Image: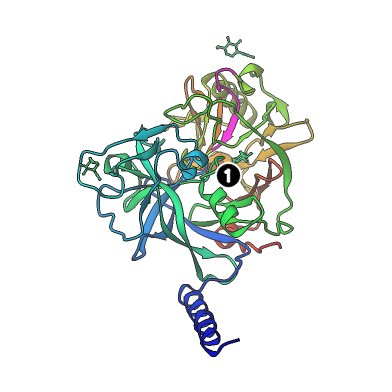
């Protein structure tokens, strides 16, 4: 080996080790973690990543069924590393974008570039959806192993406008889509770091976490149910031929104190031509939303089983009670259990008082389910019902693991996700 080649190699090694030291990048993180906070005024679950060059913190509302990461690029987006996705390029086909913005008539900036493919960033809370362009930029997220940050240099996301931020929590500038697409945040994490295609969700009224990769769940044994695919998009703007990015499960019946309530079972299955019906999980609905006839059946049966006088109801709930007339047990208020019965009568998600009741004031608590009228999806399991439940969204095996209420108090506030290799 000539001396000069030797020096060049030595220099290259040195540069490589310097660059990895600078970003603190473990060569293969075994998992990534989002620390999650709940905003007490909007009841949204938020997290913070870093994005752009130079990196700046970006606060996002978590949308479990969201298709991708989108941020406001209209206001204050400065970076030297943004790359628009050219129409018909591979990122566009990965994202299944069928649309092209050939020319942007305003001054060029991220979100306004010629010949860029477009998607529909969706704020389901407002609700508002618009056209936005696909592009990539640097992001930095926390590695689960040691808390250092790892960077991804070309993370795909969609540029939205400032108006899309309507009704999102203070300081939030976008939404973290964790849904079932090839460009969602989990998919990009799995692909970049070769992680097992699974993620864990543990939310609480204060802090919680979302863990990307496989993890040890032996501390809270999980029950499994298949994740179902809704062949029709449930996004605000439906693209023909697009599968829903939401995570659906097969609720077959609902029991109160183990007694089935009368439900039109047609509402519980996914109508494959309309994409309507069925049961999905959501982090953007603070309480479970039920189709109106299911809501009425649930409230009637619950009130009958609980058998204590109702007090004036408090919006958005249907049945409220004086706290004095309800005792307390280790699973929360002593109220009838609500079972979401799954693939067989022995497999059910049991909802205890801690997850069914909402304390609306010192003296009043309400059944924490809301009437959704005639919605597309019959049952949308919301935040209050999944808090302090450990969920494993196993995309690889297309199944959901759930713990039901994790008994030891406040476990999700400090749940220690341990990566499984
Ligand atoms: C797009 O292309 C047109 C025509 O070539 C050019 O005038 C315009 O400045 C470009 N716009 C952007 C945002 O790059
Ligand atoms: C996109 O995801 C589907 C599964 O949803 C998978 O079968 C397909 O191979 C993926 N496509 C690419 C290009 O990664
Ligand atoms: C799906 O919905 C359509 C329109 O409401 C209805 O005509 C059709 O019978 C439904 N399909 C099934 C399998 O229920």
Q: Nearer the viewer, residue 238 or 310?
A: 238
- Which residue is rendered at x = 46% and y = 54% of the image? 155
* Residue 365 visible: no
Write down the quadrant of residue 306 in the picture: top right
* Residue 230 is one of the magenta-drawn residues: no
Q: Is residue 375 left or right of residue 354?
A: left
Residue furthest to the bottom: 3
Asked if residue 33 is positioned above or below residue 281 in the image, the reply reads below
Asked if residue 100 is positioned above or below residue 142 in the image, the reply reads above
- Which residue is rendered at x = 54% and y = 57% of the image? 209
Write down the quadrant of residue 336 in the picture: top right
* Residue 223 visible: yes
* Residue 279 is one of the magenta-drawn residues: yes
> Image quadrant for the C terminus?
bottom right
Q: Is residue 230 left or right of residue 87?
A: right
* Mark 1 beta carbon near ligand 2 (under 8 Å): no
Residue on which disc 1 sits: 386
Q: How many marks?
A: 1
Q: Quadrant of ligand 2?
A: top right
Asked if residue 117 is positioned above or below residue 4 in the image, the reply reads above
Q: Position of residue 7 (x, y in %)?
A: 51, 87
Q: Is residue 393 left or right of residue 178?
A: right
Q: Nearer the viewer, residue 42 or 111?
A: 111
> Image quadrant for the N terminus?
bottom right
Q: Position of residue 383 (x, y in %)?
A: 52, 43
Q: Position of residue 351 (x, y in %)?
A: 64, 40
Secondary structure beneath dot 1 equals: helix
Q: Nearer the viewer, residue 127 or 406?
A: 127
Which span of residues is magenta-colored? 273-281
Asked if residue 386 is positioned above or below residue 261 in the image, the reply reads below
Q: Nearer the viewer, residue 306 or 130?
A: 130
Q: Position of residue 244 (x, y in %)?
A: 55, 31
């Amino acid at each position: 080996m000539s001396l000069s080649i030797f020096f060049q190699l030595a220099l290259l090694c040195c540069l490589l080790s310097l660059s990895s030291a600078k970003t603190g990048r473990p060569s293969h993180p075994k998992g990534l973690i989002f620390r999650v906070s709940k905003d007490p005024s909007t009841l949204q679950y938020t997290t913070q990543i870093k994005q752009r060059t130079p990196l700046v913190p970006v606060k996002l509302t978590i949308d479990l069924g969201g298709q991708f990461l989108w941020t406001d690029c209209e206001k204050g987006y400065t970076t030297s590393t943004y790359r628009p996705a050219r129409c018909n390029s591979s990122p566009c086909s990965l994202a299944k974008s069928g649309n092209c913005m050939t020319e942007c008539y305003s001054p060029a900036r991220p979100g306004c570039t010629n010949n860029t493919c477009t998607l529909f960033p969706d704020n389901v809370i407002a609700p508002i959806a618009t056209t936005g362009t696909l592009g990539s930029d640097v992001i930095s997220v926390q590695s689960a192993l040691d808390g250092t940050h790892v960077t991804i240099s070309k993370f795909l996301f969609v540029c939205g406008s400032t108006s899309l931020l309507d009704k999102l929590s203070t300081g939030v500038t976008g939404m973290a889509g964790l849904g079932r697409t090839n460009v969602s945040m989990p998919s990009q994490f799995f692909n970049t770091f070769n992680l097992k295609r699974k993620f864990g969700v543990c939310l609480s009224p204060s802090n919680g976490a979302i863990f990307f990769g496989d993890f040890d769940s032996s501390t809270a044994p999980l029950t499994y149910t298949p994740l179902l695919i809704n062949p029709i998009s449930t996004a605000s703007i439906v693209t023909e031929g697009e599968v829903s990015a939401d995570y659906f499960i097969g609720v077959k019946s609902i029991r109160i104190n183990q007694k089935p309530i009368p439900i039109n079972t047609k509402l519980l299955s996914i109508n494959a031509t309309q994409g309507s019906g069925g049961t999905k999980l959501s982090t953007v609905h603070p309480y479970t939303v039920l189709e109106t006839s299911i809501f009425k059946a649930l409230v009637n049966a619950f009130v009958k089983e609980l058998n204590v006088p109702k007090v004036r109801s408090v919006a958005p709930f249907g049945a409220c009670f004086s706290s004095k007339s309800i005792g307390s047990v280790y699973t929360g208020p002593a109220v009838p259990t609500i079972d979401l019965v799954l693939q067989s009568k022995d497999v059910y998600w049991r909802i205890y008082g801690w997850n069914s009741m909402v304390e609306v004031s010192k003296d009043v608590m309400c059944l924490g389910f809301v009437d959704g009228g005639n919605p597309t999806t019959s049952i949308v399991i919301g935040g209050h019902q999944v808090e302090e439940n450990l969920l494993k969204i196993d995309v690889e095996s297309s199944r959901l693991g759930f713990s039901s209420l994790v008994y030891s108090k406040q476990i999700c506030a400090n749940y220690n996700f341990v990566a499984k290799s």
